[in-house]
Image: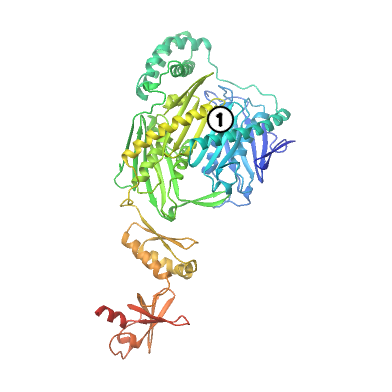
Amino acid sequence: MDIAKINFGGKDLIIESGKLAKQANGSVTVQYGGTLVLVTACMSSGIREGLDFFPLTVEYQEKTYAAGRIPGGFFKREGRPSESEILCARLIDRPIRPLFPKGMLNDVQVMAIVLSSDGENDPDVLAVIGASTALCISDIPFSGSIAACRVGYKDNELLLNPSYTQLENSSLDLVVAASKAGIVMLEAKSNQVSEEIFLSAVEFGWKNLQDIFKLQEGFIQKNSKPKRQADYKKIDPELQAKVEKISEKKLKEIFTLNSKEEREDAVSLLNKELQKELEPLGLLPQDIKTALTEVEKQSLRNYILKQKKRLDNRKMNQIRQISCEVAVLPRTHGSGLFTRGQTQSLCVTTLGTGEDEQLIEALEGEKYKSFMLHYSFPPFSVGETKPVRGPGRREIGHGALAERALASVMPSKDAFPYTVRVVSEILESNGSSSMATVCAASLSLMDAGVPIQEAVGGIALGLIKEGDQAVILTDIAGLEDHFGDMDFKVAGTRDGITAAQLDMKIEGISIDLLKQALAQAKEARSEVLDKINAAIDKPRSEIAEFAPHVEIVKIATDKIGDLIGPGGKNIKRIISATGATIDIQDDGRVIVGSSDRAALQNALAMVRENTEDLEIGKIYTGKIKRIMAFGAFCQICPGKEGLIHVSELADHFVKEVTDEVKIGDEVRVKVVGIDQMGRINLSRKQVEQDSKE
């Protein structure tokens, strides 16, 4: 058993191995404060037949016992991964994937399990550090190590590994993962921070990660095992040379074709020609196709890097043609269509009430979510056929990125008491559909009348790097992403960045190249926002005709019980009578919603009647509850009855009370007095007299 420890951000970061899960190829625990994560790494001894890709799987599990809680639901045990667990699994996967040997085919599984949670320190960065360390000390081929940290920004100060509490008031939530060669992964949510602050936060994270590298280095030297021999995808150099000789000229012609479909058809035809020519030499079709893919990759990279040309003849910083439309669907609350080249997102906004909020059970406790963005990627968007199941990890990740990009411009619940759901349908895809989603969502939200602060635009950038030569590409297309070295998505307003996500396919990117990429992203974002604002420059002044109307009534907290009534009797009566939805908050806010304006106003009036203090001289509509010889008792609001004395029943002499009113009658009465005992005196006579004047 071995333990390594370092003070990091004011708390001890502790790595330990040799105690838990010793049959795994590599296993460690990483502890920070009272949060502890177990991370294991395992590799198969052989490979699956016919496999031509690296089968890496990453699982991340949050056990509710870690926070001293029992799971909800009928089965009372953890079920399928939650959205946050899937996002954490992706957070681990993305920085470690580029550091496995090229062409490796053995199954590798990394598992991170949160065993203890203190409710203050997020386990996600601990899981990244643990994954790197477990792989490095294992016998699995891996060219690590990776370190990760979280950076916040509050009161003009950068915070290292801020707690959940500190992040609540932070304008930046940035996860930085790096290898010794440079930045490997970034994941950020921010409140329109400038590029300068964002870059300084990355540099701050990078500098502090050097301490973790030193900690890992000593720990790995003590605990690492000799690396095993893995299986690799092999390409015959002679075959690749033959394929390159035959296809080099044709590939250059293919790269000049405008559409994705034309290029795919041309490459498919080239593959058939190669097979026809090379199969008689005893070469297998799959080997020929693999060699062609490798030649295509190198040819495209040389085409961009050396000839300074791109697919469809764009400049390095040029965006494809953009079109924006709003109100494209007749009955939805809001819709926006964003098309950039051959990538198209249709976003639809739906407004709901408090009853539509999403309940989220997390280790740090339960919380409600009133803004949701869901991303859908049907197979026809890329011209394919495959079964349609639930959302995959990629869809959940892209949706979460777009949601983060828009969260900071959404109105507060007090200013806009609606639950908002945006769905992005990707109808075409050829590069950066997540950033198209951000743009289409902005259009859709403004079309629905959601008072967002500003429109948000997004752009994706790529990188081709060979040695000292490097080219950053604005608005990458599918092949540039597939064969390139970087996918850097940046979203924001004109004032600053709201979300960013960086993934590298090489061992890292320098701060200087990152600075250049941010500058290109800012320039491109401004151009995208111009296109959005040309279609709609601000939210509509009113919400859609078919959306529910929601208003807030503020009542005294000591009146909440009066509104609810015994056993919920009063609130049920109002809902039954009006059909409105009513959500009562602990601070006295009553959120009332209905698609019928008249029903909404009726419900608001009933809420006020049930909660406001009685006002002398004000007229109320009440119901006769009891009749006595000296008058009638009238209920003017739940729990409040007043006496209409026989002399106040009418403006003429009344012999018998029952001559004027009966039990159950609705009457209009004026409050004429409230004595020291709280007894209410009412007059029907004065209402009649007032109406005659």
Label 1 element class: strand
Q: Position of residue 370 (x, y in %)?
A: 45, 50
Is 527 situated left or right of 556 in this image?
Answer: left
- Residue density around tag 1, few if under 14, some if 14–19, many if 20 or more, within 10 Å: many
Residue 363: tell me if it is visible. Answer: no
The residue located at (34%, 88%) in the rendering is: 647
Residue 319's image quarter? top left
The structure's colour scheme is rainbow
Furthest toward the left, the residue is: 692
Q: In which quadrant will I find the C terminus?
A: bottom left
Q: Position of residue 190 (x, y in %)?
A: 50, 41
Where does label 1 land, which residue?
A: 184
Furthest toward the front, the residue is: 156
Q: Position of residue 356 (x, y in %)?
A: 43, 53
Residue 532's image quarter? top left
Is 374 in front, or is 40? 374
The residue located at (71%, 31%) in the rendering is: 219
Q: How many marks?
A: 1
Q: Is residue 379 above or below residue 568?
A: above
Residue 117: tell me if it is visible. Answer: yes
Furthest toward the right, the residue is: 1
* Amino acid type assigned to the residue bearing label 1 in the image: Val
Q: Is residue 342 above or below residue 652?
A: above
Q: Is residue 2 above or below residue 665?
A: above
Q: In which quadrant will I find the N terminus?
A: top right
Is 525 situated left or right of 187 in this image?
Answer: left
